[in-house]
Image (cartoon, rainbow, N blue to C red):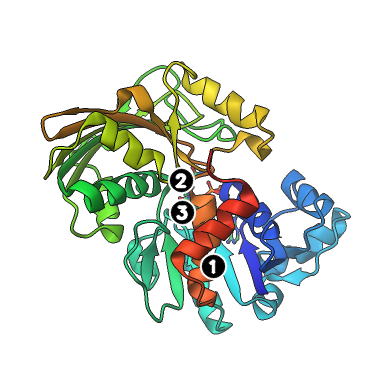
């Protein structure tokens, strides 16, 4: 049984906590909050032990009537691994604390790749040995790695070109935008997303360009991959259909991106989460050696099963395939 702590209980942290709690081979020891807000109360109501992320805030929780089991240091001493889900850049500030407590750590994609011994994607990462820390790559990098790895294995990727239409902010981020525009972000091309994919797939040539749009639900990727061989459209569809973390949206079943979120909710998935990439089946088409497709990535959710697999990667000898199977089974990943 791997004992896990989650430091930072926001968009990603609360999902990772639930996913860990759902694994038969893991125990969620507790989660941290910086302040006694509704998230802290919700964590307690879910039965999770709460720890103060910052030592000097512990009294504020008690004053608010929310009992804490201790502070971050206590949590780190009680776990085999901590999953850092603090805001971008804060993970770097937390790193010395994890190291001082000798606690292996998993970081998120908002941190620089150099923060950890290796960047991680369960489907696409090469073998990782003797790591004390891992960085689960960002939502976009996760989505692209899951797609490009099987294409490269089956047909060879000569060059991938991807335009990312990114959501302006998460549904909870009411201060983000744009609210009435589509904005190049970053305006320079290629964007940083391609190099981040190379942290996982160093030999795959990929250029990316990114925009931000006034939507909150998902990112959309417009993908063009020049392959080394020339498969048929049907062969590519079958290849991608065989990947458990890719969901091929049946032709004419879901016309709109909004339908996907409704579908996930109607299936009873907490928060309407889509852990799989959503690839529009009818968009998959091959012209010569050029493959085209659209996919959507639920930015709040796709990294969640990857964090669970990263925990096993860091703390056990369980194989990548076995870990993915266990995670998929426990969460219900794979439609
Ligand atoms: P978030 O702001 O929703 O949640 C972060 C949480 O950490 C908040 O509850 C915040 O109060 C708390 N926190 C602040 N300072 C802290 C500290 N010192 N110690 C512990 N907790 C602290 O952020 P998020 O969207 O969950 O992002 C977390 C990480 O995941 C970032 O690296 C981000 O880049 C990455 N990520 C985010 C998304 C996304 O779409 N939201 C997708 C993939 C990866």
Q: Residue at x 56, y 52 (%)?
A: 328
Which image quarter: residue 30? bottom right
Of 75 and 145, nearer the camera is 145
Q: Please, what secondary structure does the residue beneath circle 2 have? A: loop
The answer to whether mark 2 and mark 3 are in CB contact below 8 A is no
Image check: 33 left or right of 221? right
Q: Where does residue 190 sit, x and y in percent of width and height?
A: 18, 41
Q: Which quarter of the figure is the C terminus placed in?
A: top right
Q: Which residue is mark 2?
A: 245
Q: Residue at x 49, y 19 (%)?
A: 254
* Viewer-nearest of discs 2 and 3: 2
Of 14 and 62, nearer the camera is 14
- Considering only order in the chain, which callout, 1 or 3, is on the residue closer to the N terminus? 3
* Viewer-nearest of discs 1 and 2: 2
Tell me the CA gap for discs 1 and 2: 18 Å
Q: Which residue is mark 3?
A: 88
Q: Where does residue 265 sit, x and y in percent of width and height?
A: 65, 30
Graded by Cα atoms within 10 Å as few (under 14), some (14 to 19) or many (20 or more), the crowding at tag 1 reads many
The answer to whether mark 3 and mark 1 are in CB contact below 8 A is no
**Vertical placement of residue 136 versus 253, above or below:** below
Graded by Cα atoms within 10 Å as few (under 14), some (14 to 19) or many (20 or more), the crowding at tag 3 reads few
Which image quarter: residue 230? top left
**Vertical placement of residue 317 versus 38, above or below:** below
- Considering only order in the chain, which callout, 2 or 1, is on the residue closer to the N terminus? 2
Tell me the CA gap for discs 2 and 3: 25 Å
Q: Where does residue 21 sit, x and y in percent of width and height?
A: 70, 59
Looking at the image, which residue sits at the far right? 65
Q: Which residue is mark 1?
A: 311
Image check: 117 left or right of 232? right
Mark 3 CB near ligand 1 (8 Å cut): yes
Q: Which quarter of the figure is the N terminus placed in?
A: bottom right
- Considering only order in the chain, which callout, 3 or 2, is on the residue closer to the N terminus? 3
């Amino acid at each position: 049984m791997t004992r896990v702590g989650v430091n930072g209980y926001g968009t990603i942290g609360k999902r990772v906590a639930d996913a860990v709690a759902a694994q038969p081979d893991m125990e969620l020891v507790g989660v941290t909050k910086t302040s006694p807000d509704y998230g802290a109360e919700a964590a307690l109501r879910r039965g999770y032990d709460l720890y103060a992320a910052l030592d000097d805030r512990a009294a504020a929780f008690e004053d608010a009537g929310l009992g804490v089991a201790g502070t971050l240091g206590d949590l780190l001493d009680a776990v085999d691994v901590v999953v850092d889900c603090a805001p971008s850049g804060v993970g770097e500030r937390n790193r010395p604390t994890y190291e001082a407590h000798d606690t292996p750590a998993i970081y998120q994609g908002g941190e620089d790749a150099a923060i950890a011994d290796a960047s991680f994607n369960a489907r696409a990462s090469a073998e990782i040995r003797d790591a004390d820390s891992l960085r689960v790559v960002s939502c976009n990098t996760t989505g692209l790695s899951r797609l490009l790895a099987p294409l490269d294995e089956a047909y060879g990727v000569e060059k991938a070109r991807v335009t990312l239409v990114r959501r302006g902010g998460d549904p909870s981020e009411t201060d983000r935008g744009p609210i009435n525009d589509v904005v190049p972000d970053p305006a320079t091309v290629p964007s940083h997303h391609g190099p981040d994919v190379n942290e996982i797939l160093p030999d795959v040539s990929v250029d990316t360009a990114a925009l931000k749009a006034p939507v909150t639900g998902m990112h959309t990727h417009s993908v063009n991959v020049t392959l080394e061989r020339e498969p048929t459209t049907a062969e590519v569809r079958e290849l991608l259909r065989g990947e458990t973390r890719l969901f091929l949206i049946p032709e004419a079943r879901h016309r709109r991106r909004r339908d996907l979120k409704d579908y996930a909710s109607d299936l009873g998935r907490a928060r309407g989460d889509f852990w799989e990439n959503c690839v529009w089946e009818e968009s998959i088409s091959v012209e010569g050696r050029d493959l085209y497709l659209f996919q959507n990535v639920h930015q709040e959710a796709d990294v969640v099963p990857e964090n669970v697999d990263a925990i096993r990667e860091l703390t056990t000898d369980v194989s990548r395939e076995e870990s993915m199977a266990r995670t998929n089974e426990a969460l219900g990943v794979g439609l």
